[in-house]
Amino acid sequence: MTTNSAEWQRIDEGGRPNSVEARDVRSVIHGLTNLKAHLERGPLIIESGKGIFVRDTNGRDYIEGMSGLWCIALGYGEKRLAAAAAKQMETLAYYHLTNHRGHPKVVDLAEKLLAIAPVPMARVWFANSGSEANDCAARMAWYYWNALGRPEKRKFIAHKQAYHGNTIASASLSGVAYAHKNFNLPLDGFLHVACPDYFSAALNGESEEAFAERLVADIEALILAEGPETIAAFFTEPVMAAGGVIVPPKTYFDRLQALLAQYDILLVCDEVVTAFGRTGEMFGATTMGIRPDLLVCAKALSSAYIPISAVLVNEKVFAAMVAASDTVGVLGLTMTYSGHPVAAAVALETLAIYEERDIAGHARRLEDAFIGGLRRRLGGHPNVGEVRGRGLLAGVQLVRSKVPRAFFPPAFGAGRQVAEAAERYGLIVRAIGDTIALCPPLVITEAEVGMLIDRLAAGLAEVEGALAAG
């Protein structure tokens, strides 16, 4: 196969070999993309944004219904964040956190995160992405158990369908085949349990409580089969975003946390998507009643204006890290850009805006207009089986039929068809299998929510005949 002009010229209808679309095909590798298909169809190039809208190179506007990749919480064009970055670049463009060095902004940010944490935390570790932060959380769990003289506790448990990132450890934690196939992953000792998706996986007549009890019993069986003395930590999300916006049943986390405490297993809460107002509370852990030992956040920490992530660590884990680093001589975990001063300054300003504008409260107040509105508008559609979510995070589950409940074959691509149709009506969403994921910027207004629902409904109507035949 070649990747020369015969491939990329097909995407350039105007015969413009120097268009940005053609140059993209010639030069850029895109993640979560069929690379062969990309050589033929090329990219949608977004060149500007304002509020919840983005504009492509043809001058067409779209509602960015996914906040990019679940992240641009304050929307586009927030001048306060640009000003915070520029000011910090002029003051101190870079400094590191190794060998007893530091700088004021990272201290301010750490203190702020500790002050707003959903449960008491002792210290904050900084990285650059959610993937890195989850990777570091896994390493910290190993460090903790080694410090306690229990090196055999090195296995991790996470959910099938979960997405925790794409470094080697975080991709191993992820329970999705595309992160594993041809990458020699997952690593040994990374275990996966059933996704707590009541709609798709409950038995006939099974209540949510019975479903949760069954899944946690299965987790206990796995722990006992592997040996509790070998399990380091369980990674979970309050709402499984990239897994299909899965909201676990009400009793699931209470049962799970009691089980982990019984067998002395750390709980890591991945809040890369859910932190900072998305679920209607500052943290998804509060929404879902989770009390983690380590909490990972990223994305909305800076409203995606600049890369930064963090791991909040409780006192027992930090105390063990202190003891181990003294024995070894140094904490052998570092990153050049950990706690970068510009990123820290932008994150601080982001958190200030969240508080001043009561962004979490705004998401909570709009939940009925958003999730309730989706249910009222789309719930009666013959191919909509469920609308689920919290705050301003929602998933519209497509089904082949409601009664009896039947799902489309994966190759049919029902979700993809709806997402592509919605894009033609000026709405960018994400198809996760046959779930349409929606995660608009947290600054969206009630009127804009209505516009988003209208555009999704129009896209669904366009492909209604195809879905009926599917």
Image (spheres, helix red, strand yellow):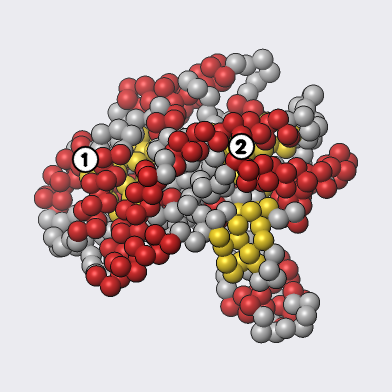
Q: Secondary structure at mark 1?
A: loop
Q: For the point 51% across and 54% down, which residue is it?
A: 75
Quarter occupied by residue 47:
bottom right
Rendered location of residue 435, percent (x, y) = 66, 41
| Label of residue 370 in the image | 2
Looking at the image, residue 340 sits to the left or right of residue 2; the answer is left
Count every numbered label the image shows and give the total: 2
Distance of label 2 from label 1 (alpha carbons)? 36 Å
Work out whether 444 lies above or below 367: below
Q: For the point 70% across and 84% down, which residue is it?
A: 17
Q: Residues within 10 Å of mark 2 (few under 14, many from 20)?
A: many
Q: Amino acid at mark 1?
A: Ala
Mark toward the start of the polypeptide (2 vs 1): 1
Which part of the image, by quadrant, shows the N terminus?
bottom right
Quarter occupied by residue 461:
top right
Rendered location of residue 427, percent (x, y) = 68, 52
Q: Which residue is mark 1?
A: 122
Q: Secondary structure at mark 2?
A: helix
Which part of the image, by quadrant, shows the C terminus?
top right
Q: Amino acid at mark 2?
A: Phe
Looking at the image, residue 9 sits to the left or right of residue 102; the answer is right
Work out whether 140 lies above or below 283: below
Q: For the point 55% across and 36% down, which residue is it?
A: 366
Residue 371: tell me if it is visible. Answer: no
Q: For the point 50% across and 33% down, which residue is it?
A: 364
Residue 61: tell me if it is visible. Answer: yes
Rendered location of residue 213, percent (x, y) = 50, 18
Looking at the image, residue 168 sits to the left or right of residue 372; the answer is left
